[in-house]
Image (cartoon, rainbow, N blue to C red):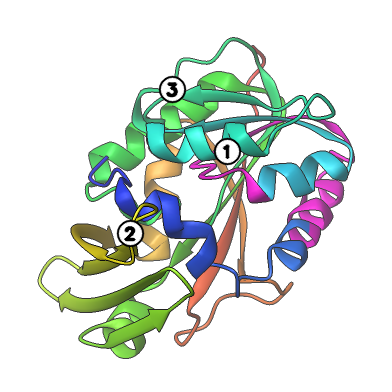
Amino acid sequence: MSTNYHTFAYVYDKFMNNIPYQEWAQYLKELFQQYNIPSGNLVELGCGTATLALLLEAQGYCITGVDNSEDMLSLASEKLTANHHIQLILQDMCELDLPNYYDGIYCVCDSLNYLLSEEEIAYTFQGVRNHLKENGIFIFDLKTIHFYQNILGDQIFCDHQEDCSYIWENSFFEEDNVNQYDLTLFVKQSQSNLYEKFNEVHHQRGYELEEIIDLLNVTGLEYVTAYDAFTSNPPTATSKRIYIIARNGDIL
């Protein structure tokens, strides 16, 4: 997996405060209910600071959060109190080795787009299949090539919060459908009024739905359907994000 959050992890929640996590959690719950998982044990791949995991726990699920960023999981653990029973595991999603079988696994917030090769996707799908119960459901989202190419690519974004700012520059490389994020962060230091500058480079890759379906089939997961994000409509050529549903039909 190509990207591991470092400095950005500590300001992630500040800059992501516009994401409608409540609505995303509700959408995921509705999808799991649709496939007969109204409760049970779920795994979140790429759980970050556990915002979504906490919301789904509140919906009655038992959540295990997996992330390959120690910094993200450190922040996630700070959110957990005695009232929460979310298990956090430091692990690359391409190398899943979890202690149980699960009713469902989900991977959203474009975490799978950070996998830059079909081989990495296949390893992740295989790990998911190995840890799903019979007829367990895998739900994941992907930003689309259309989004990277026509909306995000070559754009520059800036944001300023009370004690941090960022400049986010995008470069889309059409030959391999990879978007490069060049992040420049300015973070106020606690012992002074000075701001320290940090730089991080992240990459995400866009995939065609047909590529993903082929990889699901190769790894033994059954493709069920795909939706234009947060709807029950099929994806279109102008979808920015799609949700994909797959199932493990094997008896373990």
| Residue 128 visible here | yes
Residue identifier under label 3? 96
Q: Quadrant of the C terminus?
A: top right
Membership of 201 in magenta stretch:
no
Please name which of the two marks, 1 or 2, marks the residue nearer to the observer.
2
Please name which of the two marks, 2 or 3, marks the residue nearer to the observer.
2
Residue identifier under label 1? 76
Circle 3 sits in a helix, a strand or a loop, which is it?
A: loop
Indicate which disc, 2 or 3, sits on the residue closer to the N terminus: 3
- The kind of residue tagged 1 is Ala
Q: Position of residue 83 (x, y in %)?
A: 85, 28
Kindly report the distance in space between the C-alpha atoms of the residues bearing marks 1 and 2. Answer: 26 Å
Q: Is residue 62 above or below residue 152?
A: above
Q: Position of residue 25 (x, y in %)?
A: 75, 56
User: Mark 3, residues whose alpha carbon is within 10 Å: few (<14), some, or many (≥20)?
Assistant: some
- The kind of residue tagged 2 is Ser
- The kind of residue tagged 3 is Leu
Kindly report the distance in space between the C-alpha atoms of the residues bearing marks 1 and 3. Answer: 20 Å
Q: Magenta residues?
A: 26-51
